[in-house]
Image (spheres, rainbow, N blue to C red):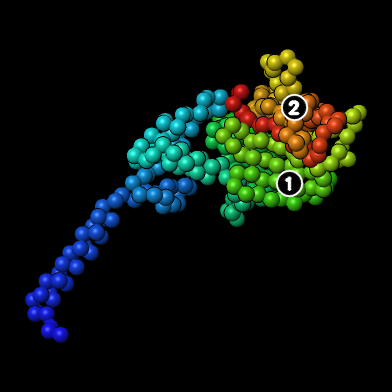
Amino acid sequence: MEKLPRYTFLLTLCLLLGIVLYFTNQIQSLPEHTVSVEQSELRVAPRVVIDTELLNAAQPLAGELEPDLSTELSLIKGAEGLPQSEQASLWQAFSESRRAIRPLTEHQEAMEGNEGAHFLASNPSQKIRARFLDDGVRLLSGYPNRDWSGVIGLDSEAVAEIRHEGTQLEYARLGIVEWYHNNRAGIEHGFIVEQRSFSAADGQLVISVQVSGLSVQALEGREAGSSDLQFVDLDDEPVLSYTGLKVRDATGTPLMGSMQPTAEGLQILVADFGAVYPITIDPLIASGAF
């Protein structure tokens, strides 16, 4: 086979190099997408940058409405060029990351307010911080000028197995699972009761919750027939609401439930006659009312 002339070979080589350089320049011309979370960077996608300093400043104060999706995404540079479904998914992922429940680092364990805690979380929209202990959660103010804290948890002497994933943490005990879900509306404080023998009196299921550091009262201005509660600090100022009780059995059938203050904290009462176990109990801790 006849060899190609030397100049033809060199011309072909230069052409290939030119193609490689062209595509390399095209790739390098795309701006990086970085998300800065606690001074760390995470690559997410090209052409999108989240300004976390503005994002943190834009978080609503407790009692204010959450910004709508278009307002939130204005803080994510380049997101306006994405399809609507991708914009929503991007913000959802970032929002859940900020509310994730995480193990404490050695440095965090030594910080004031973290004594005895194994996991921590924050709720930017409700201005609540949470420190998860062996058998309950310490809730702290997220406001720099308000200093209150309190511990809430199931009144039980049983040792709990702690499980957590994402924005949810569970205390699993014999016959009952106590769980906390950190969402934008607040921190759901739920229970899954496996069987009626757990605690029943006068034909109804009774769940006793201990509260220390805060007092429990009927929610000010609550509607007639409502059993919504509020937690007040040492100055008798309301700081948290405990509302929106929902109860359902294993078939999804809603059950009648109510809440009442006690000397030790509060009780949740459920009319469980004819209910199919397990029963799910789900009130919400929030600060939006204050």
State the image quarter where residue 176 is shown: top right
Of mark 1 and mark 2, the one earlier in the sequence is 1
Q: What amino acid is found at the position of numbered circle 2 in the picture?
A: Val
The residue to which callout 2 is attached is 216
State the image quarter where residue 209 is shown: top right
The residues bearing labels 1 and 2 have C-alpha atoms spaced at a distance of 22 Å
Q: Secondary structure at mark 1?
A: strand
User: Are dots 1 and 2 in contact, CB under 8 Å?
Assistant: no
Q: Is residue 96 visible?
A: yes
Left or right placement of residue 219 versus residue 59 in this view = right
Q: Position of residue 167 (x, y in %)?
A: 60, 44
Q: Is residue 144 visible?
A: no
Q: Nearer the viewer, mark 1 or mark 2?
A: 1
Q: Quadrant of the C terminus?
A: top right
Residue 172 lies, with reference to residue 81, above or below; the image says below
Q: Residue at x 82, y 45 (%)?
A: 175
Q: Position of residue 39 (x, y in %)?
A: 45, 49
The residue to which callout 1 is attached is 171
